[in-house]
Amino acid sequence: MSALVLELRGPAPERVDLRGVTPDRLEGLSARAIGAIEVVAGARRVPLERLFAISGDAPGELVLRGATACVDGIGAGMRTGRIVVEGDAGDHVAQDMRGGEIVVRGNAGAYAASGMRGGVLRIAGNAGDFLGAVHAGARYGLRGGTVIVHGSAGERVGERQRRGQILIRGDAGDWLGARMVAGTVMVLGRAGRFAGFGMRRGSLLLAQPPASLPGSFNESGRHHLSFLSLYLRSLHALDPAFAALDPARTTVRRFVGDRGCNGKGEVLVWL
Amino acid sequence: MSEARPSQRHVNVVCPFCGLGCDDLEIASDARGVRVEANGCPISVSAFARAAAETAAPTIGGAPAAFADAVARAADILDRARAPLLAGLGTDVAGMRAALALAERLGAALDHMNGAALQRNAKVLRETGWVTTTLSEVRNRADVVVLLGGDVAARFPRFYERLIERRDPLFPDTPATPELVFLGGAAPRDLPASPSAAHVLPCATDALGEVLNALRALVGNRALQASAVAGIEREALRALAERLTGARYAVFVWAAGLLDAHGDLAIDAAAQLVKELNRTTRAAGLPLAGRNGDLTANQVALWQTGYPLPLRFARGFPEHDPYRDSAERLLARGAADALVWISAFEPLPPPAADIPTVALVRPGTQFAAPPAVGFPVATPGVDHAGHVFRCDNVVALPLRRLRAAELPSVAEVLDAIAARLGAGSC
Amino acid sequence: MLIRLARGTVYDPARGLDGVRRDIYVRDGRIVADPGPGATIDRDIDLDGAVVMAGAIDLHTHIAGGKLNLARAMLPEDHRHDPLARTGRTRSGTGHAVPSTFATGYRYAQMGYTACFEPAIVPANARHAHLEMGDTPMVDKGGYALLGSDDFLLGLLAEGAEQPVINDYVAWTLAATQCIGIKVVNPGGISAFKFNARRLDLDEASPHYGVTPRRVIAALTRALEELGVPHPLHVHTSNLGVPGNIASTLATMDAAEGRRIHLTHAQFHSYGTEGERGFSSAAARLAEAVNAHPNVSIDVGQIMFGQTVTASADTMRQYANRRHAHPKKWLCMDIECEAGCGVVPFRYRDRNFVNALQWAIGLELFLLVKDPWRVFLTTDHPNGAPFHTYPQLIRLLMDRGYRRRALEAIHPDAQKASVVGALEREYSLYEIAILTRAGPARILGLTDRGHLGEGARADITVYDDHPDRERMFRTPRYVFKDGRLVVENGEIVDVAWGATHVVRPEYDRSIERRLAAYFERYRTVRLPNFAIADDEIAADGRGRLIVEPCGRRSA
């Protein structure tokens, strides 16, 4: 028994939509049935095997190889199992995912973890715009689970996030946590302008002051947050990238907003 | 429909060009061509102006061709395409109906040239909703008008004349001219003549949402520490907040196309502010659009498919993923391999893309490189009758034929191409 | 081409046929007399044991216009789970609560419906509504133009204009908007909301105009009677959804001063204030009043449990209902000094006391109103439920065992607060044919629809007589539209494009001079561009107009 490997047969000229091809849905299917699954490439529906060379026999773990930056919807809706993307992922990786684990060894496109409800998404490289943000046809961004980005993330991380956590080792773009409803985003690098815009609840935990906070946030002074040390310790176990986080760093400047929408979200900047 | 005689004068003509939907134009069509004689504006005067004899033939690779040959060539391109895109979509209701029918058969993606602006509004509508109004309400009811993100007059030239400098509103409590507030963006170069009480509160375009949220906090009596927001004094915002809560019918005007890439966040902030004002008084938004048939294309898409633009039919049914299927992004990523470009209102060439292009455009369009197939098409409201939606998205207006022209309509060309699909190489 | 539908069991209440075995002959789109033994039958269809009715007619279903497109735009999540793929014959689209136009037409036809009437056409949006109806296949269409909060009418009433002037304005509106009836929604209330009033009761003077809703009802019911328009004023009364609104609903009946009046989605207007929660059924009171007043008809506006969206011109009430939005998003729009529109998504839950009682109130109305010619089967699609729930609703009316089981599943306090469990009445097939065919045709003045007599358009639905009435009405065996077989066992086998029904009562053209000046001075569209020309509806060869006759104008 070895992981099921899908190797893209060559750079596809159009986008490939891999929605629906997840370990839980492939379980129990014959190799032939898997190869015959229809996926959308550009304007056409084509059998999976025409786009990918398929090997292996245990779809509980799915490995994607090749120039997969054009492959969208990897792991979308997944409930159980594991997907490893050896290169880059396109847009919407882990969208609406409910459980299991997805590892992207390269970069991910836009809308990674959008609408995700559970499980873990690990991105070794950078994430594009709208990480954990709301997509068309959904009401919320990230709704549960954990997203870990070793590199940086683009604009509007966590827009309308409702639950779950997003942990970014690098920088985050402008409008971090825009219109956030609840949940946590941590950024160890630098966050961009308008961080927390339109936040209702939830927490942005920032290692450095963001490029700007909206004028409708009020500062509520310095706070010593004892739960932070527990939280930081819990992150050590989650990913080695966070092993260096010092659990003794528990003092923050706290900003509350967005007062525009009567929000009680908090932006916590480590001291 | 009568053929244009040597000289004809048309009154109450609907102008389809900027989206404001002025329908009081007087237009002459005679041996010298078509021209606006009264109630024009810079946009309508140039857009209606036509040479008398405009006979343009279809082209294949830039060389004149017979219509049937051009249709066959276009069908062949689309038959071979693996990821075709219909874009531009500058057309009327009939043209959009034909575009959707063709896209459905091809499994194509479909987006309007103003798709990014359409999405800014669509996103707010689907995520939170809003309170909006229409032109006649603004004309008769508004006592405070807040223009967001700069001066809309450049894009809707008769906006002030028709809605602000009205003098004669229906209701005696409505002032002859509303108080005007320019919030965000730069101040307009020339303030409209009459408003005595025009306030200008400039800020960077991308800070508009931030300013609106601060204003909303003040409307809700929620204290702010900041003494200024994006360069605007807090007390100036407080004064505006008081004016808004005291207004009977405040109107917030925005044109999504004039906002930046994150303009949806500013629109959402405005929409939520308007909702908050409605708890105690009345207020409404007025999203302005309509140029090049953007609202028209969007409305037809909505009723025929359930979704706004952009769309994709790859699975045999409509799907809506505004990020993936934005025409701009599909072309930038090389994710489309054939383009049908439609611009019947203005002579706009297709965006530069190294893929076979079938261009349905107004005669006189200047191409950087000749398209694989070019169809000079008739202009709705000049060369043929039709329908377009006005900027407030409620009023559909009838377009008339003002002259006899031999050019085919967008619908005729697209239907001819659709009829030819699958017929094999020419 | 002569078709014989042989030996079917015919339910044709317009002609008093209650389950009679008859042959029906169809030629050139119409039902014809038995051509005699010498005639050549081109197609002979044996319907032994099957039930034959005229095509069903929905007299109140929101299928076209701006509010639907706003609802569509607001709810992409509602469409994503209900895609409709193209076939070689049919176009693609989506459902569910507000289906796309193609899906609407196909799905109505697949349930045996052959005509649908859009009940709330804001005049300024009428062209849009007709453009959508032009893209709605399979069924005949028509609309009711919305008056009663429009500045022009309220201005006429405020200045004490003579009734004939009002009649001229109403007749002009019907012509300009290409409609078959007049609807009033929260009379005066949509206008009042623009002046920041949050409620307006039947005898309250409206802001600015000082006109009461009662006066609006009286003027419009009288106008339609004097113009000879077949369909009576179609009224969405004041105080929709407000506990205790039965008082204003009953008073609205009186406001008609004995003239014919149709109260629409009456379920939403039959609420009392009794009980711990201050919300109770007043269906019995409404039904009693309907039974006692032969000038009154109602359609029910039944709610059915599940996700839907409410789209209404009643901005005043929709604004108030925003608190119940599910999902939490909503919009309101003020429109052209004429009316407005509010869209609020809703999920009716059987375990919610109020929703459960609303469901029971609707059933009470169906079961307590005695005359089936004066009650119509609607869910106020999509406001009470999407139209595809009709077959289930029919079973609730026809099968009391099923109804009792359904009742047992709802909120226990709502069960107790309703008399539904004690009502033994079961609708017969004949009565269902009245509610969904003969009744709507009669009240709309459609002379050659809704029956199977000679000369009728051959809109015919054939059902298998299945004891499970939901199953029976969900998938007819055959549906004919204008004599063409369009649906067979639930499959679309041919695509038809229905006609648009309108009325054109006479009016004094001098009203147009006054209107032209008014439009030019205050409005943002000029009169010639406001009115919809015939050829706009007939455009592209698919649409066509049918002008239904009016009675003689009396004033």
Image (cartoon, grey):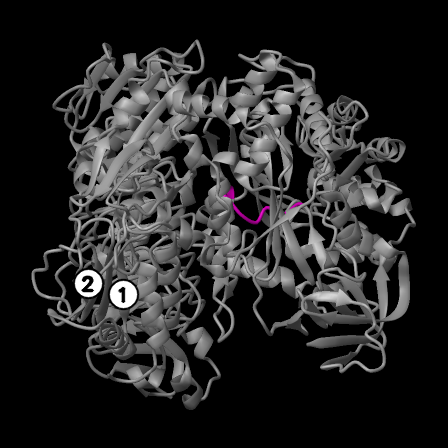
Q: In which quarter of the view is residue A86 placed? A: bottom left
- The reply to whether residue A160 is visible in this rendering is no
Left or right, C112 with respect to A216, comes to right
Q: Give the image quarter of residue A267.
A: top left
B229 up-or-down from C311: above or below: above
The disc label shown at residue B85, or none: 1
Q: Are marks 1 and 2 in contact (CB under 8 Å)?
A: yes
Q: Chain of mark 1?
A: B
In the rendered image, residue C364, in percent from the top left (x then y), is placed at: 82, 42
- The structure residue drawn at horizontal position 79% and vertical position 38%, both measured from the top left corner, is C297
Above/below status of C292 relative to C58:
above
Q: Residue at x 69, y 31 (%)?
A: C227
Asked which secondary structure carries label 2, the reply is: helix
Amino acid type, label 1: Leu
**Extreme residue in the left direction:** B368
Q: Amino acid at mark 2?
A: Leu
Residue B88 location (% of width, % of height): 25, 56
Left or right: residue A92 versus residue C424 is left
* Both marks 1 and 2 on one chain: yes
Closer to us: A23 or B299: B299
Q: Is residue C63 magenta?
A: yes
The mark closer to the camera, 1 or 2, is: 1
In the image, the segment drawn in magenta is C60-67
Disc 2 crowd rating (10 Å Cα; few below 14, some 14-19, many 20+) is: many
Q: Sequence-wise, which precedes: disc 1 or disc 2?
A: 1
Q: Mark 2 belongs to which subunit? A: B
Residue B186 in the image, given as x and y percentages of width and height: 14, 27
Disc 1 on helix, strand or loop?
strand
